[in-house]
Amino acid sequence: MHRSEIQALRELARALRDVSADPIFAQKLALWKKKNALEKTRPLIHVGIPEEAWPELVPPESMVVHDPFFRKIESDLRKKLYKWERIRDDEVITDKIYVPIQYSVS
């Protein structure tokens, strides 16, 4: 990976970390826990965006990483930030990045 790609991923990760530090997510997490415990809460909204719609919302041209593995991580970071900036549903945004396991069976 080029330095510019690494820097871009780091900036996206920092932005996500900063967003996830917002106290509103602690409130949303508490609401989801109450809802899952079948306690009364306000209606919680989760906007699910179909995978087919993402290329319009986060165009592939805006991506800077070329490696397929890290490009998926960049895409996930951009999607989370997009939802925070434009949709603001009740999804809890954390500072965690989930990396898929790579394995092979022989």
Image (cartoon, rainbow, N blue to C red):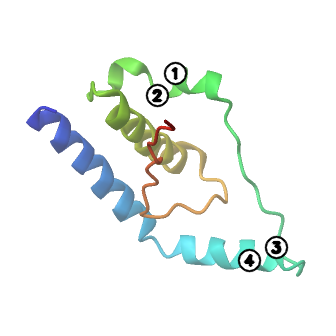
Disc number for residue 33: 4
* Mark before the other along the chain sequence, 4 or 2: 4
Kindly report the distance in space between the C-alpha atoms of the residues bearing marks 4 and 1: 32 Å
Kindly report the distance in space between the C-alpha atoms of the residues bearing marks 3 and 2: 31 Å
- Of residue 104 and residue 88, the one placed in the foreground of this image is 104
* Mark before the other along the chain sequence, 3 or 2: 3
Disc number for residue 55: 1
Amino acid bearing label 1 = Pro
Query: In which quadrant will I find the N terminus?
Result: top left
Label 3 with label 4: CB-CB less than 8 Å: yes
Residue 18 is situated, as x and y percent measured from the top left of the image, at 35, 64
Looking at the rendered structure, the secondary structure element under dot 3 is helix
* Mark before the other along the chain sequence, 3 or 1: 3
Residue 83 is situated, as x and y percent measured from the top left of the image, at 54, 45
Residue 20 is situated, as x and y percent measured from the top left of the image, at 44, 65
Kindly report the distance in space between the C-alpha atoms of the residues bearing marks 4 and 2: 30 Å
Label 4 with label 2: CB-CB less than 8 Å: no
Label 2 with label 1: CB-CB less than 8 Å: yes
- Mark 2 Cα-neighbour bin, 10 Å: few <14, some 14–19, many ≥20: some
Disc number for residue 34: none
Residue on which the image places disc 3: 36
Amino acid bearing label 2 = Val
Amino acid bearing label 3 = Asn
Disc number for residue 58: 2
Kindly report the distance in space between the C-alpha atoms of the residues bearing marks 2 and 1: 5 Å
